[in-house]
Image (spheres, helix red, strand yellow):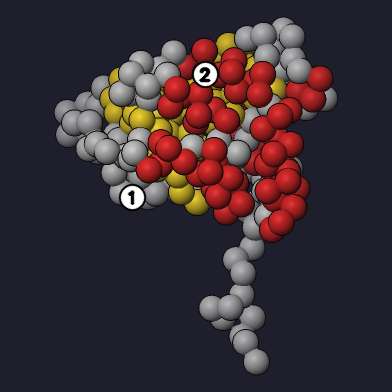
Amino acid sequence: MTEPNGPDRRPPPPRSWLLDRPLTGFALPHGRLGSLLGRVMAVLGGAEQRAVSKLLEVRPDERVLEVGYGPGVLLALLVGAGARVAGSDPSPPMCALARRRNHAAVEAGRADLRVGTAERTGFDEGAFDAAVSVNNVPMWSDLAAGMRELRRVVRPGGRVVVTWHGGSRPTRVGRRMTLDAQVLDRILTSMRDTFGTAELHHGTRVVAFRATRPPDQAGETSDDHGRDHGGERAPGDHPAS
C-alpha cells in the first residue's frame, strides 16, 4: 500500500491567497476538460489579451515572460510583434495547448513554455526585459512571493505588468469578475513594497498594475528582495547584467 505522502501521491493543488481555497475549474484546468476550458478561455479573453499586448509595447527581440499564460493567446501576439517569449503556468493541459498554438515559435527557439507558478517560474534572475501576468493574480498562492519573483526575473530597468478584468469598457465576462477597491489596493501595495514604486492604470478592457525593477545598489543581491528560486536561462539568450 502506498504511503499517504509517498511518491505516487499527487501534490495538493495551489491555493488562492485571496479566496484561501484550492484552485479548480478555469483557475487550474486539468485533464481532458482542461483543454476544452482552455479553448473557451482563448475565445472569451481575446479582447483583454489584445489590450495587454498594446499596453506592453514590446520591441523586436525583447525577452518577455508571461506568468499564467493559459492557452497562449498573448504569447502568440507577442511573438507576432517580434518578441522572444517564455512562460510559466501551473496547468499541464494549458502548457500543451499553448505549445501547439505557438508551435513555430517553440520550434524556432523563440518560445520556452514550462509548467510552473508565479512564485516559482524556474527562470534565471534578470533574464527578461519584461514580465506580464493576465487575469491570474488572485490565483497566486502567495501575493508577496509572486511579486518578488517577477522582480527577480526581469533585468534592472525591466518592466512588470500585472492585469485583471475591468477598465472603462470591460468585456461581458470581465464585468462580472472585477475586484473591489480594497483588493486592488492590496495588490498595488504589494507591488510597491517589492519595487519601491508602482502605479494602477485603468484601461478600456483591463486594470493594470505597472512597475519597473530599479537599478541594483552597489553590493545588492537578489537575496535582499526575497529571492526564492533559480532556474534556467530565457529562450535563446543570457540574463542581462
State the residue in front, 3 or 99: 99
Number of residue marks: 2
What label sits on residue 53 in the rendered view?
A: 2
Residue for point 74% across, 36% down: 40
Disc nearest the viewer among 2 and 1: 2
Label 1 CA crowd tier, 10 Å (few <14, some 14–19, many 20+)? few
* Closer to the camera in the image, 216 or 9: 9
Instruction: Indicate the secondary structure of the residue bearing disc 1.
Output: loop
Residue at label 1? 231
Residue 226 image-quadrant placement: top left
Of the residues shown, which amino acid type is indicated by label 1?
Answer: Gly
> Which image quarter holds the C terminus?
top left
Residue 223 shows up from this direction: no
The disc, 2 or 1, on the residue closer to the chain's N-terminal end is 2
Q: Locate residue 61 relative to residue 218 in the image: left or right.
A: right
Could you tell me residue 69's position as x and y percent?
55, 37
Q: Quadrant of residue 197?
A: top left
The residue nearer to you, when weighing 154 against 108, is 108
- Lateral position of residue 23 relative to residue 113, left or right: right
Percent x, y for residue 51?
A: 59, 15
Of 125 and 105, the residue lying toward us: 105
The correct choice, above or below, for 40 with respect to 155 in the image is below
- Residue drawn 31% across the image and 23% down it: 61
